[in-house]
């Protein structure tokens, strides 16, 4: 697509385009990608909001499909120039089986890669995760780390295992010859915990706080810092990476990039209070109100209950040994690799990101949406 580039309109495919991040990627492409000719939105569950996008100047094609079905993926990829593969099963709560997580995240990614190869699609951006690196099972802190920081990445939980394997597949596919003989160019973006409009867990915490009379109770020490990143900036990074992959193939191909912006480093709970505080909640306790050993016990109890109740109902609370370990381990990134490699600068300041998120929590937090 190189020389005729100025005039040529491109076909983009976004898998998982109706998810929390995917919707932002879709909207960002429509707003900020001048070469966009057609946008294909592929998802297991299509959102009704897609309808309003179909009336705009860019052709928007909604495709209901499953990434685990190779033929469905191949049909969606046919004729696409660029694929942003963000579909995934995000489950650290035991809602889905390890097998299902693997099928969606690993086999689904394999299907996307093979579809690119078969169809001559050359550019693939994969949404990976910080969890490909850590926190590891030993709870080692990752403090202001970058893409080259040594860290003992040990995965046991099905979700990080699947993301690590899928990322590896994507990076390994870089340089493979696609139909027509040209090389595939791939890269992977690793968001830390994403927040912003559409963030389900934020809304759940808000509703829980309302039920508890406007209070949340500190469970994790304020000293445990988390890196968080605004969804609009993650989406922007995807759009920019996809745009620059062709011109900067030698530099960007096969590379990983943490997603970052100007959001402050704070504990998970203190960070959430940046939004929930202005919505009327307060976090009780300067220190954790329950001893850590009790949280460990409750987390283990939840695993047991989940197992015992499985024949009857799905019991999948937020607290389990894995989420407790993640919440209780410092994981912050500090890097400029995306800036150096493809000129990424956050599109939204921290103040904007905060305001947008607060408005969203206020607008939808108490409703059933
Ligand atoms: N939310 C975070 O904090 C976070 C952080 C790092 C990375 N990620 C990654 O970002 C991506 C998007 O996550 P999200 O938070 O928007 O999750 P999400 O669940 O809101 O979105 C995922 C989307 O993928 C779709 N999907 C799931 N299974 C599918 C299948 N078999 N076929 C087609 N589509 C399918 C879902 O319907 C959904 O719309 C995921 O790959 C996730 O691993 C998320
Ligand atoms: C112990 C509780 C007291 O309030 C708090 C539990 C919070 C946990 C449910 C969340 C803490 C950290 C979150 C994860 C992190 O933000 C990064 C993620 C990466 C992404 O790829 C998927 C989501 C997640 C694993 C995210 C999930 C929820 C937490 C474990």
Image (cartoon, helix red, strand yellow):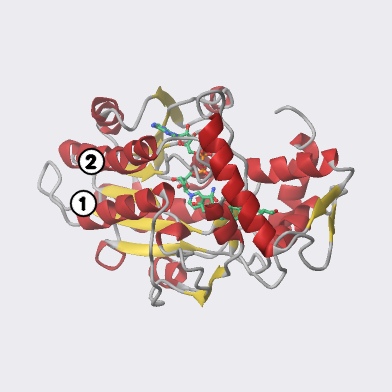
Q: Return the x and y of residue 11 as percentages of the image width and height.
A: 34, 37
Q: Residue at x 44, y 25 (%)?
A: 62
Q: Return the x and y of residue 144 as percentages of the image width and height.
A: 54, 76
Q: Is residue 110 left or right of residue 303?
A: left
- Residue 28 visible? The answer is yes
The residue carrying mark 2 is 116
Q: Say which of 247 and 348 sits in front.
A: 348
Q: Say which of 186 and 192 sits in front.
A: 192
**CB at disc 2 and ligand 1 closer than 8 Å:** no
**CB at disc 1 and ligand 1 closer than 8 Å:** no
Q: Residues within 10 Å of mark 2 (few under 14, many from 20)?
A: many
Q: Residue at x 68, y 58 (%)?
A: 294
The residue carrying mark 1 is 184
Q: Say which of 219 and 84 sits in front.
A: 219
Query: CB atoms at circles 1 and 2 under 8 Å apart?
Result: yes
Q: Residue at x 21, y 53 (%)?
A: 173
- Residue 199 visible? The answer is no
Cα separation between marks 1 and 2: 8 Å
Q: Quadrant of residue 60?
A: top left
- Residue 128's place in the image compared with 28, above or below, is below
Locate the C terminus by quadrant. top right
- Residue 45's place in the image compared with 24, above or below, is above
Q: How many numbered dots are placed on residues in this image?
A: 2
Name the disc covering residue 291, or none.
none
Q: Say which of 362 and 312 sits in front.
A: 312
- Residue 3's place in the image compared with 366, above or below, is below
Q: Return the x and y of residue 248 as percentages of the image width and height.
A: 30, 63
Q: Return the x and y of residue 73 as percentages of the image width and height.
A: 29, 31
Q: Mark 1 vs mark 2: which is more N-terminal?
A: 2
In terms of secondary structure, where does tag 1 sit?
A: loop
């Amino acid at each position: 697509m190189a020389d005729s580039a100025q005039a040529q309109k491109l076909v983009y495919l976004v898998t998982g385009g109706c998810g929390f991040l995917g919707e932002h990627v879709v909207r960002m492409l429509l707003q900020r990608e001048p070469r966009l000719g057609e946008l294909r939105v592929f998802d297991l569950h299509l959102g009704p909001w897609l309808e309003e996008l179909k009336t705009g100047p860019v052709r928007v094609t909604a495709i209901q499909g499953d990434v685990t079905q190779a033929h469905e993926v191949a049909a969606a990829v046919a004729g696409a120039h660029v694929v942003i593969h963000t579909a995934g099963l995000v489950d650290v709560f035991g809602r889905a089986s390890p097998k299902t997580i693997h099928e969606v995240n690993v086999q689904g990614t394999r299907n996307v890669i093979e579809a690119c190869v078969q169809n001559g699609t050359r550019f693939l951006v994969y949404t990976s995760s910080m969890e490909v690196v850590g926190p590891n099972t030993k709870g080692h802190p990752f403090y202001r780390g970058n893409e080259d920081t040594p860290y003992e990445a040990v995965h046991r939980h099905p979700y990080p295992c699947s993301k690590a394997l899928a990322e590896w597949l994507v990076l390994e596919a870089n340089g493979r010859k696609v139909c027509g003989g040209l090389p595939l160019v791939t890269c992977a973006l690793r968001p830390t915990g994403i927040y912003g409009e559409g963030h389900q867990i934020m809304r759940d915490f808000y509703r829980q706080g309302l039920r508890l009379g406007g209070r949340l109770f500190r469970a994790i020490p304020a000293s445990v810092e988390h890196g968080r990143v605004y969804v609009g900036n993650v989406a922007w990074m995807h759009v920019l990476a996809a745009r620059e992959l062709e011109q900067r193939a030698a530099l960007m191909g096969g590379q990983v990039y943490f997603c970052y912006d100007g959001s402050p480093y704070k504990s998970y709970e203190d960070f959430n209070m940046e939004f929930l505080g202005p919505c009327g909640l307060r976090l009780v306790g300067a220190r954790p109100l329950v001893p850590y050993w009790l949280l460990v016990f409750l987390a283990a109890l939840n695993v047991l209950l989940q197992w015992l109740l499985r024949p009857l109902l799905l019991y999948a609370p937020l607290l389990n040994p894995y989420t407790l370990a993640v919440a209780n381990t410092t994981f912050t990134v500090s890097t400029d690799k995306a800036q150096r490699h493809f000129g990424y600068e956050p599109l939204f300041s921290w103040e904007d990101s905060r305001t947008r998120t607060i408005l969203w929590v206020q607008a939808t937090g108490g409703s059933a949406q």
